[in-house]
Image: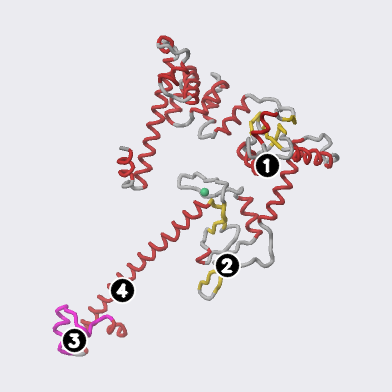
Amino acid sequence: MQNDILSSLTRLSDAELVTRITGLVTRERDATAQLVAHLAEFDTRDVYLRDGYGSLHAYCCDALGLSDGEAYNRIEVARAARRFPLILDMLAAGTVTMTAVRLLAPRLTAANHREVLDSAHSRKKGEIEAIVARLSPRPDVQTSVRKLPTSMLDAVAPAGPTAPISLALDLATSDPPAASRCIVATAEAPPAPRAAVMPLSPDRYKLTLTIGGDTLEKLRLAKDMLGHAIPSGDDAAVLDRALTVLLTDLARKKFADTPKPRPTQGNETTRGNKTRTRHIPAAVQRVVWVRDLGRCAFIGATGHRCNQRRFVEFHHLDPAALGGEASVDTIELRCRRHNDYEGRLYFGKRRLDGVKACARRVSCAMRDAGARREACARRRPRTAGNPSSSRARSGTSSPASRPTRAGPEN
Ligand SMILES: [Zn+2]
């Protein structure tokens, strides 16, 4: 059956496929809201107790086959929906997600629930956690460095020369949590576990990561050497300095100026009498990289920006192959897939335009040829009085009236 569905879907156009998916998502949201409403009512009855389940959660998992997480989310949201029925409408409309409601539910009050739920519209989990941190600010955690228990060492760094250390820091940053997570992951890259970032309050995050003994010694040495600049020895301030130096160094290496950029194969294109290069000056690369925040700047038809960070490339808005210049205004960042997508769109369109232009040229040539034949036929009886005149007047063609011969007369 699934094979039948898949084979039937291959016949759909892109627009039809989008319409179908949009409709299915709408139905799924509606079904979710209905399920939550029914669970909210079910929660007030003793049915699950009567049926031998110790809790609604156990009933959802064992009788309904939901996973732990699915059951937990739905029950928490159902209980919130009993307090604020508006949640059901928002779930059906897709303006809030189950995860968002579950995270926000403990902070919702009769006074704030409408505003808070509205602020959660289209937010990702990290952004919802930031809203929670704003509603219930928590104090900064104390910076702590502690040695992990022996049982955890094997799992964290079996081949490490020194014992891993758990380090918890407070960070203040204007970046969203996702950005902080990315920077930490890039700088540290431990095998496991990954650094954890938890919003504490607006612009404050708790970062927990595991480091090796060598890294700890570097941190201590950096604190000693920054004794005058950072007398408090604040680890978060030291880390911020370290990352600033690192990013500056990476940007310098990544987009270094060179007086004679080395040409690579396919790096030049000839158009007319001019040879153009695909090279993008380092100064342009640096400005574009910072302006686009190192993320794909492709914006879809709905206004959504891609923002992909991985495998980002410089993209010529005017293709270099057609002589496009490389300037800050004509270069943008693209992820690999969007770069490829736009290339196919542009050159596919050009090929199509080429076919249409060719068809137009043929059509014009045929129309002109017909006009010339008629003009030639009209003139010939008066000027030549040749035997073909009667055929010309009657509208039949003759070899003498071919457009190639009539051309010079026009
Ligand atoms: Zn992209």
Tell me which segment is drawn in magenta: 385-403
Dividing the image into 4 quarters, which one contains the N terminus?
top left
- Residue ID at (55%, 49%): 296
Q: Is residue 204 visible?
A: no
Amino acid carrying label 4: it is: Ala
In the displayed structure image, the side of residue 342 where residue 18 appears, left or right: left
Q: CA separation, marks 1 and 4?
A: 68 Å
Q: Is residue 286 found left or right of 388 in the rendered image?
A: right
Nearer the N terminus, badge 2 or badge 1? 1
- How far from the left and from the top, in percent, is residue 72? 50, 22
Secondary structure under badge 3?
Answer: helix
Residue 28: % across, % down: 39, 31
| Element type where label 2 sits in the image | strand
Taking depth in this image into account, of 193 and 181 the one nearest to the observer is 193
- The secondary structure type at the circle numbered 4 is helix
Label whose residue precedes the other's in the sequence (4 or 2): 2
Name the spot of residue 390 as percent of width and height, x first: 13, 84
Residue that badge 1 annotates: 188
Ranked by sequence position, the earlier of labels 3 and 2 is 2
Q: Residue beneath label 4, please?
A: 365
Q: Nearer the viewer, residue 371 or 182?
A: 182
The verdict on residue 391 being magenta is yes
Left or right, 189 with reference to 300: right
* Residue 50 % position (x, y): 41, 9
- Give neighbour class at mark 2: few <14, some 14-19, many 20+ (Cα, 10 Å): some
Q: Earlier in the sequence, mark 1 or mark 3?
A: 1
Label 2 sits on residue: 277
Which residue is denoted by mark 3 in the rendering?
A: 381
